[in-house]
Amino acid sequence: MTLDEHAEELASDLGVDKEEVKEDLANLVNYSVPMDEAKQSLRRKYGDGSEGGTTPSSKDIAEISASDSNVTVTARVLTVGQRSIQYQGDEQVIFEGELADETGTISYTAWEDFGLAAGDTITAGNAGVREWDGRPELNLGESTSIERSDDPLDVPYEIGGDAELATLAPGDRGINVEVQVLEVEEKTIDGRNGETDILSGVFGDESTRLPFTDWDPHAEIEVGASIRIEDVFVREFRGAPSINVSEFSTVTPLDRTVSATENAQRMPIREAVDSGGLFDVELTGNIIEVRDGSGLIERCPECGRVVQNGQCRSHGTVDAVDDLRTKAILDDGSGTATVVLDDELTADVYGGDLADATEHARDAMDKEVVAERIADRIVGLEYVVRGSLSVDEYGANLDATSFEASDDDPAERARTLLAEVEP
Ligand SMILES: [Zn+2]
């Protein structure tokens, strides 16, 4: 084998540039190092894990799988979030976020303070791999070594956690938002350290509105304020993303006004359902069916659950109270969602209040007449529905805040659309 062939074999084994290996190899051979020994030495230099024993092999992020136990990764830090958790009975501060290389991104949790900052290029030696939600994640702990490089790794991803509200999803961490505070209220809850004051409310930006909880009340969070908040995390609350502000978040007033949108996000039903849940969305479709459990219903006075024959699943025989509700299936051709109308919206579509409905049912000696009249009035018609969408294994429910008959004439809409696309 020629030097060139040795270099070629080595370069392909190690996945590095052949010319570089050939130069190193030539140097060693020139110093009278036997070829086999020279190749061993270069394998160590270029980090082939098979020679190192306990050092795990270097991997591209896209190659890491949940079946790896430990890996070595060179990556750019995209985000760093700080959070306090209960771990084995103790309070522990952890750091979480995303790492990226040219091939992909991966979430990490650091159990020690490695002083990571967004933009850092690091090599994490011996990082643990665990599976979370079907995807591999990295655990950086006491057996992990972190080396920094001054040479920034070029990655095709946004560095830093700046994000618009509409792009956030449960699980996001180390995020920065610029929002206007639309609603805020103080609450006292039974926290893990006794009674705690928290803030809850609604933030808005140009893209959408989202609920929030501030677990360590910040004075800058007041109604009407435009603020930048660094280091928030996102959790699911009632089926939709919710922003969590913590003791580690920093809140800074902005010298501009964030114009919070008044409009809900509009999208096809399938896209909304695929998103997993939305706090404020507007869906347009046809009502194809009014479901059982609509019209005049009975609720448990203790827990508010709908009861059958005065029997609550939690409270046994109860003195049930009457209520109005509608559950109707909305279909736009791309998908379906169950629209849930409360007593007021149900009274609107029924054309009468609870007293009217009970009288109607008594006269007919049948409760179902109420649901039947609602179905007569809405099935087959197109509606624009705004509300909060939650999605679980039983389906998608849109808790409506408004339910309006679409006044769009389909022919008119087609003309408008044509006018827009024609030059
Ligand atoms: Zn009950």
Image: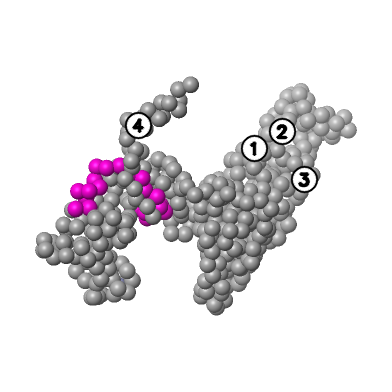
Question: Distance between the Cα atoms at labels 1 and 2?
Answer: 22 Å
Do labels 2 and 4 touch, CB within 8 Å? no
Q: Main secondary structure of the magenta part?
A: strand
**Amino acid at circle 2:** Val
**Amino acid at circle 4:** Glu
Relative to 202, does residue 383 appear above or below in the rendering?
above
Do labels 2 and 3 touch, CB within 8 Å? no
What is the span of residues highlighted in magenta in the rendered image? 373-400
Question: Distance between the Cα atoms at labels 2 and 4?
Answer: 63 Å
**Amino acid at circle 3:** Ser
Residue 16 got which mark?
2
User: Counting residues from the N terminus, which is met first, the one under dot 3 or under dot 4?
Assistant: 3
Residue 249 magenta-highlighted: no
Closer to us: mark 1 or mark 4? 4
Residue 50 got which mark?
none
Closer to us: mark 1 or mark 2? 1
Name the residue carrying label 1: 156
User: Counting residues from the N terminus, which is met first, the one under dot 1 or under dot 2?
Assistant: 2
Name the residue carrying label 4: 412
Location of residue 283 by image quarter:
top left
User: Counting residues from the N terminus, which is met first, the one under dot 1 or under dot 4?
Assistant: 1
Find the residue positioned furthest to the right. 31
Q: Nearer the viewer, residue 417 or 106?
A: 417
User: Counting residues from the N terminus, which is met first, the one under dot 2 or under dot 4?
Assistant: 2
